[in-house]
Amino acid sequence: MALLEVDDLSVTFARRGQRAVRAVDGVSFSVDAGEVVGLVGESGCGKSVTSLAIMGLLPKQPGLRVGGRAVFDGTDLLQLDDRSRRDIRGRDIAMIFQDPLSSLNPVLPIGLQVTEVLTRHRGMKGDAAAKEAARLLDRVGIPDPKRRLKEYPHQLSGGMRQRALIAMAVACQPRLLIADEPTTALDVTIQAQILELLKDLVRDSGTALVMITHDLGVVAGMCDSINVLYGGRVVETARRRPLFREPRHPYTVGLLGSVPRLDAGRGERLNPIPGSVRDLLPWPDGCAFAPRCSRRVDACVGEPPQLVLAHDGRSYRCVNPAPVPAPREEEKR
Amino acid sequence: MIRFIVRRLLQLIPTLFGLSLLLFIWLRRLPGGPETAILGERGTPEMRAAIRHNLGLDEPILIQYGRFIRRMIRLDLGTSIATKREVTTEFLQRFPGTVELTVTAMVIAVGIGIPLGYLAARRRGRLLDHLSVGGSLVGICIPVFFLAYILKAIFSENLGWFPSSGRQDPTIGATRITNFFVLDGLMTREWDAAADALWHLVLPGLALASIPLAIIVRITRASVLEVLNEDFVRTAEAKGLTENVVRRRHVLRNAMLPVATSIGLLTGGLLSGAVLTETVFAFSGIGAFLADSISQRDYPVLMGFIMIIAVVYVLVNLIVDLSYSLIDPRVRVR
């Protein structure tokens, strides 16, 4: 059985006097123990909201509705009361966020921000907690951890801050780690280091990782399987290799086509997807991507495209998918 | 830290110098003078001139100012024209009352304002939020002397719960040491005297607290709302910390920064005296005395009091800045 099974998750923001917004609209995916799963999509596609909904971290506001199920190790996280959720968060499921500076409390020393997790979930206090915190900082590659424990976030570099946040996240050896664009706010050279660190940690501890990103490069380097999100739904799911080799959904094709390549010829232009995420067709009226899609046919509009299950555990939500090179298709069947 | 304090105290010197010069010239420019207050309408021009000469007011203004500065350097504030007593004595007798009143008002304002502002933010858009925001608007708008009269009418004259005037019941015969009546009572173990002085502080303290309370509620609420949306609060939640720890350690502490600043400014403002509240409750602080001194053109008292108040104001804000650096390491002073 999967470690995390997200089934038909939906998040709706309804504000008085305004049309309800479905930020997440029936997202389903699963994560096996020790697996690295990518959630990929443009900004606004619902990938962050999905992760916050699973964690129960969506800002409480009137009109917020979360539906569906998110079953972690047999319990539906969405049905838990606040207290049990707090017990799971930080201990069994931990999270790393995008902007390491704003994600750290500016007025508390790094040490306290690490030890408070240890105190909360592992009952460690005083010297023992400080020692363990230093070990954790050392584990995530922060030099001179004893000194760093006493320092404040503004005294650390961007990469160090993200390492510190990772240390807090892995402090209780969670079984699932959710990383929401963990490298977006960092320099390119630092990005690579942080990704290496995450890969290391996952490999050593057997922690499953959900990697949320818009960066296909990150996905290519890390993920075992990938879910591509568009307009609040998963439009394509596949293992890493097949996805990159033969993307079926036109949106996945578009994403891959808009990645700049070093081996592209001089003067060759990028192929961006026309339009923006806001040109969205509501799912009940057809395929949300249809207004921007180059393979659009009449059948795209009218009713939502069904999920097509293909071989090898992959699936896509498209009535006119990109063709697969014929011979290979024959071969497999 | 020490250097920061010393630097701030040194900055006080030019501040006082400039303030005193402005004030000196401005006071002398006001029509009328102490001779009018002393003689009233009847004095002849000769008598007026004689008094002015005696007080040294007929000399060129810069010479007068020079004399004032020379005395200031020796920390001598001169003698009151009206009461013929040392300005310092007058001040030491009245300022403790004002300090007690200010402390009472600020304890009420902070003690109610911060929790209320915090709760209003947590229950944004619900009844408690609307009540406290609306209530604080009323608190800012209502004139303090009006509130003072209402409190006095209800709780003193009608219900008789609190005394209506003064700082202490004179029949208690309390011993005076510092002129801080509550403190004196505690030091001499005259518990009844301390309790009575405290009792006298409640109503004027409440009246005086209304505006600071309203301001603190609003600033706390706005500040907490802002901090609640910060990423680091989400991080704290993601760590699974208990609600209590998230609140105290992560939300409140960060939300206190702007509140600390406003507490400093408000305290400084209250310390310069609350004329109307003191008058309504016949409370002897510096406010009413200062107002009288203005109408009597009691130059030495005005100059002296305002110089001391300026120093107190700077000291209060210095304390605020130091506490600021305790809360926020990013502004830690060197």
Image: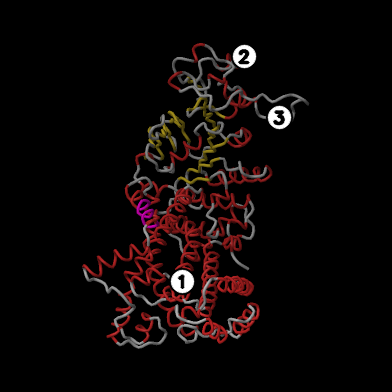
Q: Which mark is residue A261?
A: 3
The residue where tag 2 is placed is A327
Residue situated in front as seen by the camera: B186 or A319: B186
The answer to whether B115 appears left or right of A240 in the picture is left
Q: Amino acid at mark 1?
A: Leu
* Chain ID at mark 1: B
The residue carrying mark 1 is B271
Q: Are marks 2 and 1 on the same chain?
A: no
Q: CA distance from mark 2 to mark 1?
A: 89 Å
Subunit under mark 2: A
Taking the image as shown, residue B59 lies to the left or right of residue B47, namely right
Task: Determine the image quadrant of residue A67.
Answer: top left
Q: Residues within 10 Å of mark 2 (few under 14, many from 20)?
A: few
- Provide residue B245's location: percent of width, then percent of height: 42, 57
Name the residue at 78% across, 26% down.
A266
**Is residue A97 or residue B33 the one in the foreground?**
B33
Q: Which residues are magenta?
A: B132-140
Give the Cα separation between the discs numbered 2 and 3: 27 Å
